[in-house]
Image (cartoon, grey):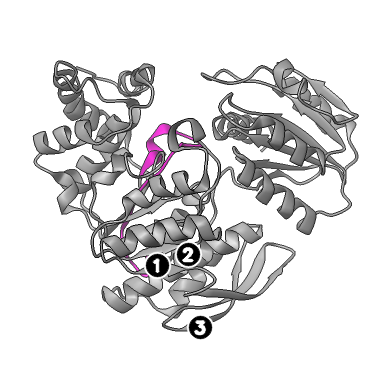
Amino acid sequence: MVRTYKEAVEWIHGRLKLGVKPGLKRMEWMMEKLDHPERRIKAIHVGGTNGKGSTVCFLRHILQEAGYRVGTFTSPYVEQFNERISINGQPISDVDLIKLVQIIQPLAEELEQTELGGPTEFEVITAMALYYFGKMNVQDVVIFEVGLGGRLDSTNVIYPLLSVITNVGYDHIHILGNTLEQIAFEKAGIIKAGIPVITAINQPEALQVVEEKAASVRAKTYALGRDFTVFSHEPTASGERFSLQTPFTTYHDITTTMLGAHQVKNAALALMVADYLRTYYSFLIEREHMYHGIRKAEWLGRFEKMNDRPLIIIDGAHNEEGIDSLVATMNVHYPNRRVHVLFTALGDKPVTAMIRKLESIAETMTFTTFDFPRALSAEQLAEQAMHPNVQYTNDWKQWLKEKRKQIAKDDIILITGSLYFISNVRNFIKNKYK
């Protein structure tokens, strides 16, 4: 039995060796043993390829502004492990984490002796979150972020007030499928009978899959661009300004400090969810809560400015669609600036396509690696580059120290790739330079 925080986290991470095991049988087994804490949670379920974390962040801030206590379950973490289970943005305590492991560990060991096999790391953490919000610390509402896919994701044991699907893109194709229709089918697996689904999917073939699934279980679909619409969008010096028409009302001149057209879509999703909760579930959310929540929202590691002169931006763009959004945001907000890119990625990503897109905005391209399963070597990445100014290094910390001194003050250092890597970089910069 674990006794310390270090032992608790080590036990959780020790489950990583079991990899990914899609399916809900192990979760259902644990929920039964725990007397179904998931049935006591008023939840909102957020799935999609990209933008889940940002959408959760926008929605949490709106609900907090309205005075609600909001639990969140997100992944991965950026600063500390505990933030994956948070209340009003504050990670749970080390003491609570230890208690949760002490409750779940015996179940995991018992489950290992069955034909179902032991639970994975993500299943263990999900069970911890469900028990915490269902039994230990019940909240007004809890927002659950899907880990992988949706249909067979361990979070899919909840029965939410609303289902949200941000978008569909080519990620985790070795598990979810290699067509948009196949991936959309997996994402649509979170849709429950009679529970409305709100989505920003823009590919007709993917949206059709979601709508067919929703119709089959009599769940109404609200799609961005059809049922609720962004208009008058323009970038500002500090973020984005836009207006939104929902089926219930119109919001003019909403502002956010989270940069990029993709963040406007995520904010629109959160606003539509809040509008629905206000209209049909009697949530006491006023217009000013909407405006203030969107304006106050910040999401660590997503187009985050870590230093001013030179400007250092970190962004956890870990798939092709994420890189598209990053490049578009750089072109809109920082045109004609020299950009020095530091990039690394995991081996299951379409790195060649990602590199090619980044090369379009890069003055220099540097590749690195970090200590993580499936991380590609710096040399492997550099071999796929076609940029005229390419280098690679295994010591990204030293590279960053030297690059800050070498470049002009108006140049930009852009660090991107794996979210796990961004977490390391963020902590290093925060401790070293701030």
Q: Which residue is mark 2?
A: 269
Distance from label 3 to label 1 (Cα)?
Answer: 14 Å
The quadrant the N terminus occupies is top left
Q: Quadrant of residue 12?
A: top left
Does 235 lie within the magenta span? no
- Residue 288 rendering spot, x and y as whole percentages: 47, 77
Check whether the beta carbons of the residues at disc 1 and disc 2 lie within 8 A of each other. Answer: yes
Q: Residues within 10 Å of mark 1 (few under 14, many from 20)?
A: many
The quadrant the C terminus occupies is top right
- Is residue 301 visible in the rendered image? The answer is yes
- Residue at point 41%, 39% (across, down): 148
Q: Which residue is mark 1?
A: 273
- Residue 409 rendering spot, x and y as whole percentages: 88, 43
- Is residue 60 visible in the rendered image? The answer is no
Amino acid residing under circle 1: Val
Distance from label 3 to label 2 (Cα)?
Answer: 14 Å
- Extent of the magenta region: 63-85
Residue 185's place in the image compared with 347, above or below, is below
301 left or right, relative to 293: right
Residue 319's place in the image compared with 232, above or below, is above
Q: Name which of mark 3 and mark 1 comes first in the sequence.
A: 3
- Residue 287 rendering spot, x and y as whole percentages: 45, 79
Q: Which residue is mark 3?
A: 250
Q: Residues within 10 Å of mark 3 (few under 14, many from 20)?
A: few
Residue extending furthest bottom? Answer: 249
In this orientation, which residue lies closer to the viewer: 215 or 430? 215
341 left or right, relative to 4: right
